[in-house]
Image (cartoon, helix red, strand yellow):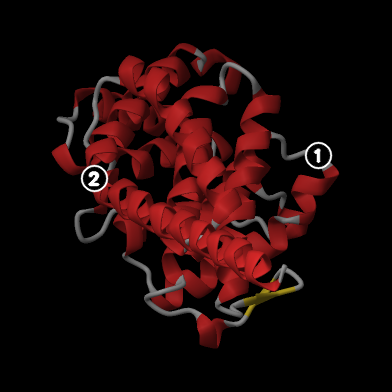
Amino acid sequence: MKKIFLILFSFAFYSCSADKMAVKTVSNIIDSGMPAVFSERDLKYAKESLPSNLKLMEILLKTKEDEKLLLNASIGFCGYAWAFLEEESSSQAAEFYKKGIFYSSKILEKKKAIKENQIDSKKVNGKTAPALFWNTFCKSALINLNPSDSENSAMLGETEDQANILAQKYPNYFYNSVYAILGSVYASKPKIMGGDINKSAFFFEKSFEKGGDSFLLNKYMYAKTYAVSSQNEDLFIKTLQSILDAPITEQTAFFDAVAKQKSAVLMEKKNEYF
């Protein structure tokens, strides 16, 4: 009986170890393939192919919470919601953003960089900054999706705090987009809650530095939040047209293509904002 138990235990241990090794292998493959996703400009193809990959990552994460897999799951759910779901189904987009928040929070918890929704700035480094960025991106997008929702508005303070920490320590991660997040926050908040159109302009200008102006997502957020909040119709039209006319950058083709698509839709809705 003892021998049988040892055999079964050894088999279970080996099986568990093999599963975790398989997850690690697939996680590395997915991670090395992310540049191919970012460079994909065929949005129809991306929309149809990405859901199965997202589900695969969720299945793998049930076996092992691999940090690369957690980060790519967060990026995947946030990116898919922003690219394809916001205009189609705000409720589904919200669920995807919440998944992105969940997976990135797992990394921050593992690194002891977050406790009770508070970030320890001392723990923000090269290993935690990407997770913190996507956690912040997801929260910001979720808030913008439905700012009147009480749960969303409750995240506004922590989102702003996280973005400020990133701006101080890793401002250039993902093409200066943390500055675009801060610009959006200050443009969208009411004055009584700390909204400041001048601060918004300052942070958007920072997002355009060091090549950030060629990342069309930054410009799109500038038009959608700052130009609308400041009721500058000429700037709104000029910025959106510059996005539509801009070439697509190979490394960020997916995000650029989505920004172009969203800009065309936003341009058609101009009369709703001015």
Amino acid of disc 2 = Pro
Q: Quadrant of the N terminus?
A: bottom right
Residue 238 in which image quadrant: top left
Report the front residue among 81 and 32.
32
Amino acid of disc 1 = Asp
- Give the vertical position of 80 relative to 201 (above or below): above
Residue with the mark numbered 1: 149
Q: Is 231 on the left-hand or right-hand side of 22? A: right
Q: Residue at point 75% right, 46% down?
A: 152
Q: Residues within 10 Å of mark 2 (few under 14, many from 20)?
A: few
Considering every residue shown, the one lying at the far right of the view is 150
Q: Is 234 on the left-hand or right-hand side of 136? A: left
Report the front residue among 274 and 174.
174
Q: Quadrant of the C terminus?
A: top right
- Give the vertical position of 258 relative to 190 (above or below): above
- Give the vertical position of 45 relative to 104 (above or below): above
**Where in the figure is residue 85, as x and y percent of width and height?**
55, 24
Report the front residue among 178 and 113.
113
Q: Residue at point 57% right, 70% down?
A: 108
Residue with the mark numbered 2: 35
